[in-house]
Image (cartoon, rainbow, N blue to C red):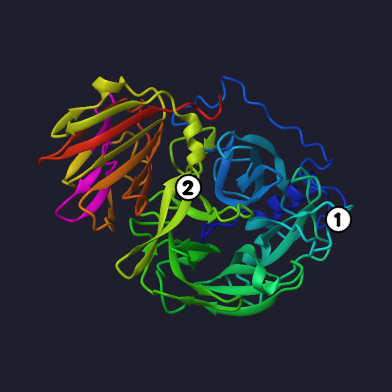
Amino acid sequence: MIRTLKYIALVVILASCGASRQTGNSNTTEQSGGNGAASTTSLLSSDYNEPHRPQIHFSPQKAWMNDPNGMVFHNGTYHLFYQYYPDSTVWGPMHWGHATSKDLIHWQHLPIALYPDSLGYIFSGSAVADINNTSGFGRAGKAPLVAIFTHHDPVKAKAKSNYHQNQSIAYSLDDGKTWTKYANNPVLKNPGIKDFRDPKVMWYEPAKKWIMTLATLDHITFYSSPDLKDWTKESELGKDFGAHGGVWECPDLFPLQHNGQKVWILIVNLNPGGPNGGSATQYFTGQFNGHTFTPYQTDTRWLDYGPDEYAGITYENTGDRKIFLGWMSNWKYGQVVPTEKWRSAMTVPRELGLEKVGDKYLVTSRPSPELNVLNSKPTSLQNISATNFNLTKETGKLKGPARLSFTSDKLESFTITLSNDANEKVLIGYDKASNNYFIDRTNSGKVSFEKGFAGRHTAPRFSTSANMDMTLIIDNASVELFADNGLSIMTEIFFPNSLLSSININSPGDFKISSLRFNNMKSIWR
């Protein structure tokens, strides 16, 4: 959620939302269409063709979107809920939008899942498949989906109360099509903390209990529950380590394996205070025993060094895989980017892993293999001298999204230039002197909408290997960089006046590419 807001006539807005969207008790009414009607929205070939519209990233059909919420895999379906304001392209009274996918790539839009009510807006949270029916919401052997979210009361917030954010739940017995809010919400009341939000809930099998990881001002508080209704405080941490340039938000807690060792990962999103300005996602590694998280490190590590990944969390109920998704924007300029019908998109889904570099555990991110379904016939090249290499001559001009992957046995400085006929360009590469990867969007097209948007951003290289690999996921208005098997990650958006259509690779040294693979990619909306 955005850290500071201007509440203008919020009482009137909230009342109108509750009156027009719901019937009966606003705490218990069935949601998502109200009458259980969950007709999906079909996309015509003319949709999703606006300038800058992502073709391989999820974006709403219209209006404002920010944080991914409630991501859960259930009965063969991926559910993506998200912070949504359907009546404008800027932030407003928050709802939970909803989309589903069978393959994590192609999405079907569903009616809004959760609307604001008398307890407030529906801020960020998570969802779980309660397969043991610990909540008692299940019926006739049907396991419920349970959403856990923050109710944000704008009236109390405007009055500068420290009690305006509380945790509530809702459940679904028809695979997420319709939702019923729990009659006794909130289930976790605010003890008097200004920022008390964004519950991420997971099942902790050793103790047969649910664990809630909650953002509380500038640190994390853990709670536990046997039934998702009654919560007990377990512990808190983070006041004395990590980045504290802004409020802590949208946390996540989960284990990853490395050579048979279980390592717990605590994700904490931060706004502002990111490594390249504004919003960003930090993480910590350590151990969790069902009560407390004991960190291996207290230095700050970032899951993505680019300026345009935020509020990232992982899917629940995916077994040993941890699939990560983030909001592909930044609160510095997210509400003023030059799109008209909609604002913002999600990153591509990423599979998280763990590597050890020296004595440090580092989280890796790689494009989820499901993305391969979008690949067209590849262009494969070997042994390229990249002093001045025009890749476009080999592949033809870009006409949409693409994937570029390459390896080198000896890393030297290089620059990949994505450009168009108007000489608008995005520069991507590696600087050997500083040992940093970089993305430069200074001359990428429309940049004047925010003073600090134009610029060059960097990410450190963590690998100590002489060779390297890099994958770029290129869309109409974004690029995601994955280097060294996912150790260094950057996400960047940009807004050229026409599509960037050419790719050139240059190096001041003797940079040789051992192997290169290029794929045009199909739109997820066709």
Q: Is residue 348 left or right of residue 464?
A: right
Task: Specify the quadrant that holds the C terminus.
Answer: top right
- Work out which residue is located at the far left of the displayed protein and give it: 509
Magenta residues span 416-443
Q: Nearer the viewer, residue 403 or 477?
A: 403
Residue 25, label in figure: 1
Q: Is residue 390 left or right of residue 5?
A: left
Q: Which residue is mark 2?
A: 350
Element type at mark 1: loop
* For discs 2 and 1, the disc positioned in front in the rendered view: 2
Look at the numbered discs 2 and 1 and tell me whether their residues touch, using CB distance below 8 Å.
no
- Binning the other alpha carbons within 10 Å of mark 2 as few (below 14), some (14 to 19) or many (20 upward) gives many
Q: Position of residue 85 (x, y in %)?
A: 62, 45
Indicate yes or no whether the magenta region holds residue 318. Answer: no
Q: Nearer the viewer, residue 440 or 422?
A: 440
Residue 333 seen in this snapshot: no
Indicate yes or no whether the magenta region holds residue 428. Answer: yes
321 vs 402: above or below: below
Instruction: Compare marks 2 and 1 and give the one earlier in the sequence.
Output: 1
Alpha carbon of mark 2 to alpha carbon of mark 1: how far? Answer: 40 Å
Callout 2 amino acid: Arg
Q: Is residue 137 left or right of residue 158?
A: right
Q: Position of residue 77 (x, y in %)?
A: 67, 42
Question: Residue at point 28% right, 33% down?
Answer: 516
